Image (cartoon, rainbow, N blue to C red):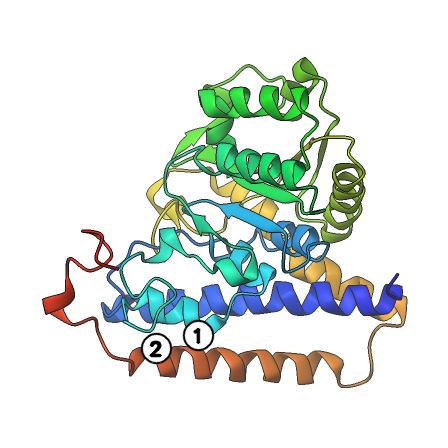
Amino acid sequence: MKPVSEILIELYRTMLRIRRFEERVVALYPEQQMKTPVHLCLGQEAIPAGVCIHLGREDQIFSTHRSHGHCIAKGMSLKSIAMELYGRETGCCRGRGGSMHLADPEQGIPGSTAIVGGSIPLAVGAALSAKMQDNGRASVAFFGDGASEEGSFHESLNFAALHHLPVLFVCENNQYATSSRLAARQPDTGIAAKGAGYGIPSRELDGNDVLAVYRAAGEALGRARAGKGPTLLECRTWRWMGHVGPTCDVENGCRPRDMHEEWLSRCPLEQLRIRLPESGALSPDFLESTELAVCLEIDSAFNTARHSPDPDPSQILRYVDGRG
């Protein structure tokens, strides 16, 4: 068991890397060199950080169109992601996948999918494989509130519960599917409550409180590895930017400004930053040195990406027609 101070520092560093990476995408996207659509997770950093800190390299995560934070928290190279955003041959998918289809199997990231709810049955399949092989691996499905309305969500929970599979379902409930509010789409029963119908332990928690996510995910993954089956976590949060792109849809009237400002005041990174001195986790120059190190890493990632080679146009069918 790591000391509390070490855990807090790791969580903070992961959240800061996600935050600064996404901010750099916002700053550079208007240059029009990134052609892929980007779905940013600014404001949601606590969820991937609090979950993925419990995962080993061999454990697998399955992500969505909003995948950057999950992949960074799981250990994927920032350069690999940045190069993919620029569509470079050296990107994680050789420039063919873009932001919504990041993959790094060696880091336990078989791939993310833009299909709403698509990550859920994939994680269940991986968990079934792990159980059949008895290899001790766990899998995690990240998905949004909109995915809880898909049939794949219910079918997957039922199958995972029936077979006691080592899978964790993590719903990042940012309360809007594109610009449609959750309350306008579903009765106000809560997403976590849906797990009860399948006998799955479920919890609703503050997704901006990284320590709450850390504790809940640790308990759930412990259950999964002990053969006690799946858990559903509904992590309530808020995305700072629009559904897609580097701008904020609040300006267009897609979401209420007062709610947006309230959630901005509950910044997950700032909440943890306040707790660090209280825990004794801070050395006098910790924040400054960590900020500098992260910014230098991101500078290197994006500078490399901007100057990396594009795919050869003559190879446009490669990886599509079976030639590999």
Task: Choose between 145 and 138: the one closer to the eye.
Answer: 138
Give residue 133's quadrant in the image.
top right
For label 1, the SS is helix
Q: Residue at x 62, y 79 (%)?
A: 291
Image quadrant containing the C terminus: bottom left
Real-space Cα separation, disc 2 to disc 1, in angstroms? 7 Å
> Callout 2, which amino acid?
Ala
* Residue ranking furthest to the front: 133
Q: Residue at x 70, y 58 (%)?
A: 53
Q: Is residue 237 above or below residue 232?
A: below
For label 2, the SS is helix
Q: Which residue is mark 2?
A: 305
CB atoms at circles 2 and 1 under 8 Å apart?
Answer: yes
Percent across and percent down for residue 315 are 15, 66
Residue 66 seen in render: no
**Local crowd size for mark 1, using a 10 Å CA cut-off: few (<14), some (14–19), many (≥20):** many
Percent across and percent down for residue 149 are 47, 22
Q: Which tag, 2 or 1, sits closer to the chain's start?
A: 1
Q: Residue at x 72, y 58 (%)?
A: 271
**Local crowd size for mark 2, using a 10 Å CA cut-off: few (<14), some (14–19), many (≥20):** many
Q: Which residue is mark 1?
A: 79
